[in-house]
Structures are given as structure tokens and as C-alpha cells.
């Protein structure tokens, strides 16, 4: 079966640089996948992506060696299984608050005896375990190679973090900084620099380190991404395709307008 290189990066103690796709487009995903990211996450929670488009985006990402991940909308076994069957090599799941929810998440993503994932890797058998990569042996290795990543972003999740991190099958955890800020009574954007939110992020990171679990977080700039990696985060998402598009387009338009103004 095709190896999940993110596990190899983490085993070396290094950080994964993750791209983020919110635009429902296989071409956008393909362009992002060719920019040097270690992984690309397709966002089905807040992005504009539905299942069929997600499948074409996974196909586009697989024109490269980049590892494809998907953030699902909720801890729904049916959706989790279909995302993995389509060839995603891991799932990020929002709002995991306690051990019971974490266990249900893992079990939905793992074949027996680890869990109750139903057999039917319709595309995954070609991407992950087709004739080129092991003769259709996907189901024999999927439990080891696919990633289960709960998001820690509520007061309840922080309270139960030690127990959540001891659930077998958890590959990493992920902080949604805006949701975490709101859960602590702060603004979703500006509140991320509030001392209470910073303290919560540090606690999540240090607790994950204690359990040997990589911690991930979303960032809004290269400077913040570097800072988070230096702090010890091993899974760092850098902005998103729509933000790259809007920021660069705005920068170029403003530069042209300023250039024209200087010549008048």
C-alpha cells in the first residue's frame, strides 16, 4: 500500500506543512498540490465542497506525492467512511469533546477489529492499494496508514484532553483557533491573541507532546506558521486557497493602481 509520508515526517520529529482547499475545484486543488506542501486538506466543513467535487479534488492531488486529507463536517460515520473510501488518507473531524466521541470517530475510520468501518474502498483501492502499489491490498494496511485527527476547540475538549489523547487510533490533534477563541468567550479572529486563548493553545500543545501525539493548528501567515512550528506544532496549515487568491489578487490590483497614480 502507498505509504503515508506524514507519519514518516512526524517520526523524524519534523513538522508537516499543510495546504488548505476551500474552493470546490479540482484545478484549484491540483495547483495547490504542485506548490510543495506535504499534505493538502479538502475542507468539507466550512469550504464549499461536496462529495463528488471532493472526489475529483482527491484525483487532482494524486497527480503529485502530496498526501490528501479531508476535514469532514461532523462526526458522522457514513460521511467518514465515504471520504476514506474515496481515497483520503486521513480525516480531520471538528468538535470532538470527550472520550466517547473520540472513540466513535476512530471506530468509524478503522476496519475490524479496531473499529466498524464497512468494507468498500471504491477509489482508495486504486489510489492507496492498486496494482502499482501492492496489488489491491489496501484493506490490509489502511488501519495503519490512514490518519484520524480530532479537532480540540471547546472548553469540554480541553477539560477531557488527557483522556482523549489516550484513545487508541488517534494520529494527531488539530486546533481550530477561531472556534477555540469563541469557546473561551473571545472574538474568533482578534481573540486569538488574547492571553487566555494563548494559554489554552499552549496547554493543548504541551499535553499532546506529553502523550507523543503531533499537534496541528491553522495559521494565517508565513510568520505565524514559522512561529508555531518553532513552538513545537508538527502539523501547520498555511492559510487556504481562497485566501491566497484574494490576497495576491488584491496586492496586484493595488500595485497597478498605485503605479498608474504615480505616472499622472
Image (tube, grey):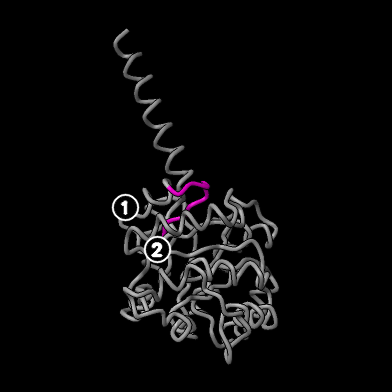
Count residues near mark 2 (Cα–Cα under 10 Å), then give few for <14, some for 14-19, many for 20+. Answer: many
- Which quadrant holds the C terminus? top left
- Residue 104 in the image: state x and y as whole percent: 66, 80
Asked if the magenta segment contains residue 198, the reply would be: no
Q: Is residue 153 visible?
A: no
Disc ID at residue 143: none
120 or 168: nearer the viewer: 120
Indicate whether 115 appears above or below 192. Answer: below
Identify the residue at image location x=39%, y=37%: 248
State the image quarter where residue 111 is shown. bottom right
Which residue is label 1 attached to?
35
236 or 189: nearer the viewer: 236
Q: CA distance from mark 2 to mark 1?
A: 10 Å
- Residue 259 in the image: state x and y as whole percent: 31, 18
194 or 57: nearer the viewer: 57
Indicate whether 195 appears above or below 128. Answer: above
- Residue 155 in the image: state x and y as whole percent: 69, 70
- Residue 38 in the image: state x and y as whole percent: 35, 64
- Horizontal arrangement in the rendering, residue 182 relative to residue 140 (left or right): right
Dot 1 lies on which element? loop
Identify the residue at image location x=64%, y=74%: 158
Tags 2 and 1 in contact by the CB under 8 Å rule? Answer: no
72 or 16: nearer the viewer: 72
Span highlighted in magenta in the image? 17-26
- Which quadrant holds the N terminus? bottom left
**Which residue in the rendered view is the most extreme toward the top?**
264
Count residues near mark 1 (Cα–Cα under 10 Å), then give few for <14, some for 14-19, many for 20+. Answer: few
Which residue is label 2 attached to?
39
Dot 2 lies on which element? strand
Indicate whether 41 appears above or below 126. Answer: above
- Horizontal arrangement in the rendering, residue 1 relative to residue 190 (left or right): left
Amino acid at each position: 500500500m502507498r505509504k503515508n509520508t506524514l507519519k514518516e515526517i512526524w517520526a523524524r520529529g519534523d513538522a508537516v506543512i499543510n495546504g488548505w482547499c476551500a474552493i470546490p475545484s479540482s484545478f484549484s486543488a491540483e495547483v495547490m498540490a504542485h506548490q510543495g506542501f506535504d499534505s493538502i486538506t479538502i475542507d468539507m466543513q466550512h469550504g464549499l465542497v461536496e462529495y463528488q467535487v471532493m472526489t475529483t479534488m482527491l484525483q487532482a492531488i494524486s497527480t503529485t506525492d502530496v498526501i490528501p486529507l479531508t476535514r469532514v463536517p461532523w462526526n458522522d460515520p457514513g460521511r467518514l467512511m465515504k471520504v476514506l473510501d474515496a481515497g483520503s488518507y486521513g480525516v480531520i473531524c471538528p468538535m470532538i469533546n470527550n472520550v466517547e466521541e473520540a472513540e466513535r470517530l476512530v471506530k468509524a475510520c478503522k476496519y475490524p477489529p479496531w473499529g466498524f468501518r464497512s468494507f468498500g474502498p471504491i477509489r482508495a483501492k486504486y489510489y492507496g492499494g492498486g496494482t502499482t502499489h501492492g496489488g489491491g491490498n489496501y484493506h490490509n494496511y489502511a488501519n495503519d496508514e490512514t490518519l484520524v485527527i480530532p479537532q480540540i476547540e471547546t472548553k469540554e475538549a480541553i477539560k477531557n484532553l488527557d483522556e482523549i489523547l489516550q484513545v487508541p487510533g488517534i494520529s494527531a490533534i488539530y486546533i481550530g483557533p477561531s472556534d477555540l477563541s469563541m469557546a473561551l468567550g473571545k472574538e474568533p479572529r482578534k481573540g486569538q491573541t488574547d492571553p487566555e486563548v494563548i494559554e489554552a493553545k499552549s496547554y493543548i500543545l504541551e499535553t499532546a507532546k506529553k502523550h507523543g501525539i503531533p499537534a496541528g493548528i491553522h495559521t494565517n501567515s508565513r510568520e505565524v506558521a514559522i512561529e508555531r512550528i518553532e513552538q513545537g506544532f508538527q502539523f501547520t496549515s498555511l492559510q487556504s486557497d481562497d485566501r491566497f487568491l484574494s490576497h495576491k489578487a488584491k496586492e496586484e490590483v493595488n500595485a497597478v493602481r498605485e503605479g498608474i497614480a504615480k505616472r499622472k
